[in-house]
Amino acid sequence: MRSRHGHGFTLPEVLVALLVMALGVLGAGAMQLTAQRVRQESQWLTSSSRLAADFAARLRANAAQADAVYAGFDYDAQREPSPDPTFACSTAPCDSAQLAQADLAELKQQVAQALPTGRVRICRDRKMWQGGRLRWPCTGDASAPLVIKIGWRGRLPDGRPDSAGDDYAPGVALAIAGVGP
């Protein structure tokens, strides 16, 4: 005796299953894109921290030039060209001011290479934080600590650099103890 009900799936059941599967694939793809963006941000944060720490060591080694040359440095890799890879002081001895200029030229090159949309600022600042975010402006007080601020512009949802986004905060700010007044 045969049953009047057939065995198998009906067209609406198959379509619902395909819809659920498509939503799952889309969700997995979105999760992959988010993970890739977070990985890139993490890489930029690591590079910025390393650059700030390395440059702080250079600055401490040439502390006499802290206010004369280093303070007031502001470089935006997206708006200024990277300097040539040859630096002064690499072929002949130089004084501390020339060494500071060579250090800054090398920092520009490193920022342009590691953070193509990056910015670095060295200044005296008492108020690095405002509203729970690091900030670019500096107080400039002579007794304030010397601070290295490094940041980068993020990416748009489609992956392109956010070239119009000037409302971004530094990602790293490193106050250098024992340099200056």
Image (cartoon, helix red, strand yellow):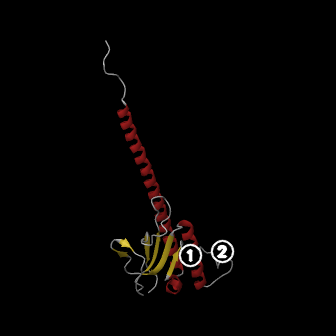
* Badge 1 density bin: few <14, some 14–19, many ≥20, Cα 10 Å: few
> Which residue of the protein is positioned furthest toward the right in this rendering?
91
Q: Left or right of 27: which side holds 115? A: right
- The dot on residue 1 is none
Q: Left or right of 89: which side holds 75? A: left
In the foreground, 45 or 89:
45
Q: Which mark sits nearer the N-terminus, 2 or 1?
A: 1
> Mark 2 falls on what kind of element?
loop
**Image quarter hosting the C terminus:** bottom left
Which residue is found at the position 47% from the left and 68% from the top?
153
**Image quarter hosting the N terminus:** top left
Q: Position of residue 123 (x, y in %)?
A: 46, 81
Q: Position of residue 47 (x, y in %)?
A: 50, 65
Kindly identify which residue carries mark 2: 86
- The dot on residue 80 is 1
- Placement of 178 over or under 23, stated as above or below: below
- Placement of 92 over or under 162, stated as above or below: below
